[in-house]
Structure formats: structure tokens, C-alpha cells
Image (spheres, grey):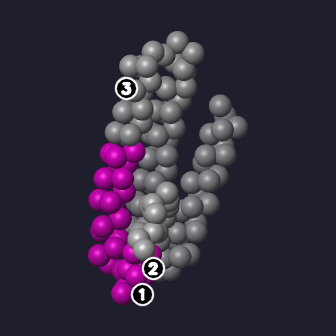
Amino acid sequence: MANGDAKRDAAVEKHIAELHVTLKITAAEESQWKEVADVMRANAQDLERAIDARDANRGSASAIDDLNSYAEIAQVHANSVKKLAGAFSVLYGQMSTEQREAADEAFTHRGHNAGKVAKQ
């Protein structure tokens, strides 16, 4: 578990660092960025706990248990997105037009179109 936690933490930190660069966070925005980054870290931990809870019962889980655990993971994810949107909206309001465009690009295209067929 500890190795998995370390990998997850490293992936989250890498994503936070990449977004920091992509969004060109300024010195004046650092305190608000820290709040966004802290929400991202907490969200990752919450999701990992939900996944761990599902995995702990995998051997004895019924179909209903599996569906309920999937619903719990989906709910944790939805709550996490809401928390991130709340924290990020304050920062977004302080950003320059260039930064907002970078944010729009970064959040709009992050895998949300995966599996969708392009319109012809």
C-alpha cells in the first residue's frame, strides 16, 4: 500500500507542477494556487480511500456490493470535482486572459473526449 501511495502522491505532485507551469502561476497567485493544489491532494487521497475500500471487499463482494462501491467511488469523484471547481474559480477570477485561455484548454481537453466518435 505504501508504494502505491507514494506513486499516487508523485503522480499528483507531477500534475500539480505541470499545471503550475501551464497556467503560468504568478507570485501574486501563489497563495490561491496553494489552496487549489491542497484540494487536488486531498481529492486524490479521498478517491484512493474509496478505491481501497472497494478493493478490500473484492473477494467477498456481491454484485450489489460491487455496484454500491462503484457508486461510492463515482460520488467521491463528483464531490472532488465540485471542491476543485470551487477552489479553482477564485484563482481563475484573478488570472490574466492568457492564463484563462490556458486553463480553458487544460481543463477542457483532459481526456473528456476519450472514446467519443468525431462528428463527420
Residue at point 59%, 57% (across, down): 13
Magenta segment range? 77-105
The x and y percentages for residue 35 are 40, 60
Q: Earlier in the sequence, mark 3 or mark 1?
A: 3
87 or 114: which is nearer to us? 114
Residue at point 44%, 24% (across, down): 66
Residue contact at pointers 2 and 3, CB within 8 angstroms: no
The vertical placement of 63 against 107, above or below, is above
Circle 3 or circle 1, nearest the eye: 3
* Amino acid marked by disc 3: Asn
Q: CA distance from mark 1 to mark 2?
A: 6 Å
Q: Which element type, helix, strand or loop, lies under badge 2? A: helix
Q: CA distance from mark 3 to mark 1?
A: 43 Å
* Amino acid marked by disc 1: Glu
Residue at point 57%, 15% (across, down): 59
The magenta stretch spans residue 100 = yes
Location of mark 2 (residue): 102
**What secondary structure is the magenta-colored segment mainly?**
helix
Q: Which element type, helix, strand or loop, lies under badge 1? A: helix
Location of mark 3 (residue): 68
Label 2 neighbour load within 10 Å: few <14, some 14-19, many 20+: some
Residue contact at pointers 1 and 2, CB within 8 angstroms: yes
* Amino acid marked by disc 2: Ala
Q: Quadrant of the N terminus?
A: top right
Location of mark 1 (residue): 98
